[in-house]
Image (cartoon, helix red, strand yellow):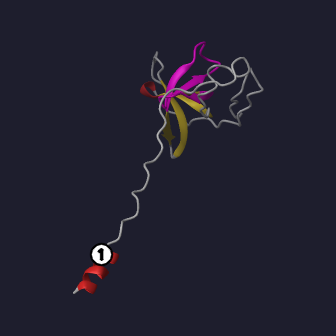
Amino acid sequence: MRWALICVAAACGPSSPPPSQPVTLYGQPEVLTPGIVDTDAGSYHTVEYHCLPVLAKPCSCVYSCGLGRRDEDDRWIVTHSHWKTPLTAVLDKWCVGGDCKQVFSAQIICDGTCAPKPAPTCLAIDLANEKEPCPTAP
């Protein structure tokens, strides 16, 4: 009987240590090289651009291509030669006669209603071209 107790005690030896908790970091980034790196350099994010037609959905008006940059709220800030100030938009789909394209559905005040027409085709983004970084295909 003494052997049975010894074997049971050996089989129930100490358990392995619990796994360590994942490391969690708190606080704001700190710039360690002041004067060399801008103070906001600690926050990195990817800038995403799209070149898409602009749509005023409530009035069915489709415009040429605009250059959009995604902001922090998943909205798009769109610059276009037709408007002096940038537009706020969301990505949307516009279909006319089976021709569907992704567009910037922008918050544009409508003067009237347009006859639905297919969205134009946009060419590649050219950020070096300040006048027309987002050209519309002829």
Picture coordinates of residue 45, whole percent (x, y): 59, 32
Q: Residues within 10 Å of mark 1 (few under 14, many from 20)?
A: few
Q: Give the residue furthest to the front.
A: 2
SS of the residue under disc 1:
helix
Foreground residue, 36 or 23? 23
Q: In which quadrant of the rendered image does the C terminus lie?
A: top right
Q: Looking at the picture, does residue 36 appear above or below residue 24? A: above
In the figure, 96 relative to 82: above or below? below
Q: Quadrant of residue 101?
A: top right
Depth check, front residue: 79 or 3: 3
> In the image, what residue type sits under mark 1?
Ala
Q: Nearer the viewer, residue 112 or 42?
A: 42
Residue 74 lies in the magenta stretch:
yes
Asked where in the image residue 119 lies, by quadrant, the reply is top right
Highlighted magenta segment, given as a residue range: 64-90
In the rendered image, residue 4 lying in the magenta stretch gets the answer no
Provide the residue designation for mark 1: 9
Count up the numbered dots. 1
Which quarter shows the N terminus?
bottom left
